[in-house]
Amino acid sequence: MPLGDDVYAELDRRLEPVDAARAAAFPGERSVRQPVHTCYVPADAVVPGLARSWGDAALAALDEHGLPDLGLDPALVEQVLPRVRAKLAAEPVEDLRVDAEDGYRGPPEAEDDDVLRAAAAVAADLAAGTAPPSVGVRAKSLEGPTRRRGVRSLDLFLGGLAADIAIRAPTAVVTLPKVTDVEQVRAFLPVLDALERAHGVALDLELQVETPQAVVGPAGTVTTAALVHAAGPRLTGLHHGTYDYSAALGIAAAHQSSDHPALDLAKQLMQVAVAGTGAVAVDGSTNVLPVGDRDRVHAAWVLHARLVRRALERGLYQGWDLHPAQLVTRHVATQAFFRAALPAAGARLAAYLDRVEGGVLDEPATARALATVVLRGLDCGAVDDAEVRTAAGVERADLERLAGRTAPVGPPATARGGARPTIPS
C-alpha cells in the first residue's frame, strides 16, 4: 500500500523552513565579475589618474627589465604577453583600495586631509571614466584605540567621494581589517547603514581575516563562518592578511609568506565559509617588491608569479598587489593560467552539452565549474569569444547560464545578485 498524502505533507511542513533558511544563507555565486586583484594604495599616495599611472609604470618596468623565466610554459607566456600589454594600457587596475590603515604612513594630524584628497582624486577619476571598475577604502580596525579614527576616515572619504562628482557615486567597498569577534561585524552594520544614508553611496563590505581569533574562536568554533553569516548580503569577500596573521602565529619574519603552510588552514576555512554565500575568499600579498636593479626585479617577479599561480591552483582567484610593477606578473600568471585551462575545459563542456561519452563523465556541478573557469578567462582578457566558440562551441550567454550567472556581467563592486540598493538622498 503506497504512502498517504499526510506523510508527504508532514515532510514538507518540517523541511520547507529549512529549505527557505538555506536559500537565504546560501544564495549562490554573485552574477558579477570578480577582480583578479585588489591594489592597496596609501591614502596620501592617491592622486588623479592613479590607475593609468600604475599601468604606465608597469609597462615601463617590463620594457626596462624584460620578462625573466617565470616558471610558466614559455609558449603560454608568449601568447599572453601582447594581451597583458593591452591590459596594462587599458585596465591595469581592476580593484582599488584606498588605504588608511597599515599602508598609511602619514601623521595622525594629517589623516583627515589625506583621506579627503584621496576621495577627491578617486571622484575625479570616476567622473572622467578612468577609475578602476571597483573602488573602496580600508580604514582602521574597530579595536578600542582606533575605532573612532577608523569610522571618521570612512565618513570623510565617502563624503568626499559623493560630494565631488555630479552623479551619484557607484557602489564602494569598505574593508574592515583585523576582525577578532563576530560582534564587531554586527556592530559595524548599522554604521554602514548610517554612512549610506549620510552620503548616498551604496556600500559593500569586505572582512580581513588576519588574526587567529577570526579563524577559530575560544570555544573551538570556526569564526570565519560566523563572520560571513553575521555580515549577511553586504559581504563580498574575506581577505587574508599574510603578515599580520603570520606574525600572530609566531612565524619568523624571514619566513612570512602567503605560501607558508601554516596559512593554508585559514584560507581553506575561508573558502569553506564563503562557499555558496556569494562572497569570495581572497589571498593576501607579498611585500617583496620588484624594485631596484634587474636582478632584484626579476627575483621579485619570479616569486610573485609563483605565488599567484599557487593561489589560482587552490581556487583563490584574487589577491593583493602593492606596487605597480607587480601588475606585470599578476596579469601574466593569471592569463597564462586561464589560457592553459581553455582547451580541456572547452572540450569537456562541448562533450557535456552534446552528451558525448568520453574519458571523463561530468555532472552539472562540474559543468558549472568548467563554465566558470572559462568565464574567468574571458573576464581577465586571457581568451576571447572566438576562441571560446572554437574550443567549446558555446557563446558567452550559454556559459553564463551554465555558471549560474543570472544577470549580465558587470563591475565587481555591486550588490549581491547584481542589483544596487536604492539609497535615499
Image (cartoon, rainbow, N blue to C red):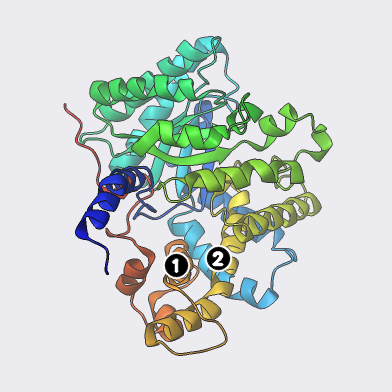
Q: Amino acid under label 2? A: Gln
Judge whether 5 appears above or below 50 on screen.
below
Q: Residue at x 44, y 55 (%)?
A: 91
Q: Residue at x 20, y 59 (%)?
A: 5
- The residue pinned by badge 1 equals 365
Q: Amino acid under label 1? A: Ala
Q: Residue reaching furthest left?
A: 425
Q: Residue at x 70, y 42 (%)?
A: 263
Compared across the picture, whether 265 is left or right of 344 comes to: right
Compared across the picture, whether 24 is left or right of 149 comes to: left
| Position in image of residue 245 (x %, y %) | 68, 32
Q: Nearer the viewer, residue 30 or 17?
A: 17
Quadrant into which the C terminus falls: top left
| Position in image of residue 83 (x %, y %) | 51, 68
| Position in image of residue 302 (x %, y %) | 74, 57
Helix, strand, or loop for circle 2?
helix
Q: Residue at x 62, y 74 (%)?
A: 76
Q: CA distance from mark 1 to mark 2?
A: 24 Å
- The residue pinned by badge 2 equals 335
Helix, strand, or loop for circle 1?
helix
